[in-house]
Amino acid sequence: MKPNFSSRLKNCNPSATLEISEMASKLERKGKDVISLGVGEPDFDTPEPIKQCAIQALKDGFVHYTESQGIENLREKITQKLKKQNGVDTNKKEIITTPGAKYALYLICQGLIDEGEEAMLFDPAWVSYPEMIKLAGGKVKWCPTDENHSPEVERFKEIIHEGTKLVILNSPCNPTGKVYSKETIEAITEISREKDVFVISDEVYEKIIYEKSHYSPRSDYENVITVNGFSKTYSMTGWRLGYLNANEEIVNNLTKIQQHSVSCPTSFVQKGARCALTDEIDPYVDEMVNKFEKRRDLVMEKLNKIEQLSCNEPEGSFYAFPKVGVDSMKFSKKMLKKANVAITPGKAFGRKGEGHFRMSFANSEERINEALNRISVFLEEVLNSFS
Ligand SMILES: Cc1ncc(COP(=O)(O)O)c(C=O)c1O
């Protein structure tokens, strides 16, 4: 029998990066030396003390359901972190821990967006936001960014209206590596507040930052829901743990969705995450960020020598977003076939991403060096065939 899928699902696109990663796997199976710069996860191991805490929790039999919002002493620790590091005065009743930051975003979309309502994104944006909005029945409204990848605040002011349901801000930004200035974030949040619109501040890359400093708008504005997670900062992508911080009314209502979907995040993972927020783990994070910064410098040094490309220096995250000015999907496929380097086509991130590609520097310096050498040769040889 042929299934008749819901219109919400029919409307949902598969990941635009899938085609490239499937092609890459095929080439690898044929024995090709493919360098993957497509990945969105740190290439480091989870710090050992975090693992030990989770192992101990398992040994102690901490293997049952927990409170739906997550264990109290993890939520307590998150509020301390938010107070100390982000200037957000909050309490444990305002936290939901979730299976990854992604699920926190999913809860927000499901809980706040009604059929046909608009949610605003800054173009280009992370691939999952538009699909989550559509899965909730909503419509995506794009607001442009300027040539430095910063939101166009004046344009935002013109586009936003009382019917806009929410605005998603992501700084440091995936895919551009841009860190938005405090003034820009404040302006967007203030304009949203005047229209009674919630701002979702996705701060998953807050610690992976090289220039400027991170600003959490929830420290000054109550129309903000903060989303964060453990995947990027602590190399814990596979553990699946994130959280959101919002007022109690939002938290109580979104918790209902969590109760009836996943029940709670995995019990022993929560114990590991609690350990991640202790001072003992800071040196591990510093070391990882220092390595990312060295790689970022290497990437920029090499990219600046390739005359066919231009690239704003990433100020945070572990992505560079060079402009090449040709069809990004064709370009990425050809690059993979000819140079065996896997990148992500810019069009996956929105209309403004077209003509760009995203390259992750979650790979060793040696492999990054080799990949950029291959990219340089590839561009010399084939770029003319695109024009
Ligand atoms: C901007 C952004 N937000 C959220 C996430 C989701 O992270 P998590 O692994 O915590 O679900 C990602 C992962 O790539 C991301 O890039």
Image: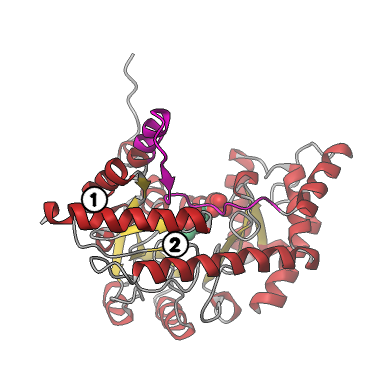
Q: Who is closer to the viewer here, 340 or 168?
A: 340
The answer to whether residue 30 is magenta is yes
Q: Compared to 186, does 98 lie above or below?
A: above
Asked which quadrant contains residue 220, the reply is: bottom right
Q: Who is closer to the viewer here, 26 or 251?
A: 26
Extreme top residue here? Answer: 1
Q: Residue at x 35, y 51 (%)?
A: 344
Q: Compared to 6, does 217 lie above or below?
A: below
Magenta residues?
Answer: 21-46
Q: Compared to 154, does 114 lie above or below?
A: above
Local SS, label 1 = helix
Report the colour scheme: secondary structure
Asked which quadrant contains residue 14, the reply is: top left
Q: Residue at x 29, y 64 (%)?
A: 142
What residue is shown with label 2? 319
Extreme bottom residue here? Answer: 183
What residue is shown with label 1? 331
Q: Who is closer to the viewer here, 316 or 265?
A: 316
Q: Residue at x 87, y 37 (%)?
A: 59
* Horizontal side, residue 42 vs residue 173: left or right: right
Label 2 amino acid? Tyr
| Crowdedness near tag 2: few (<14), some (14–19) or many (≥20) residues, C-alpha within 10 Å | many
Local SS, label 2 = strand
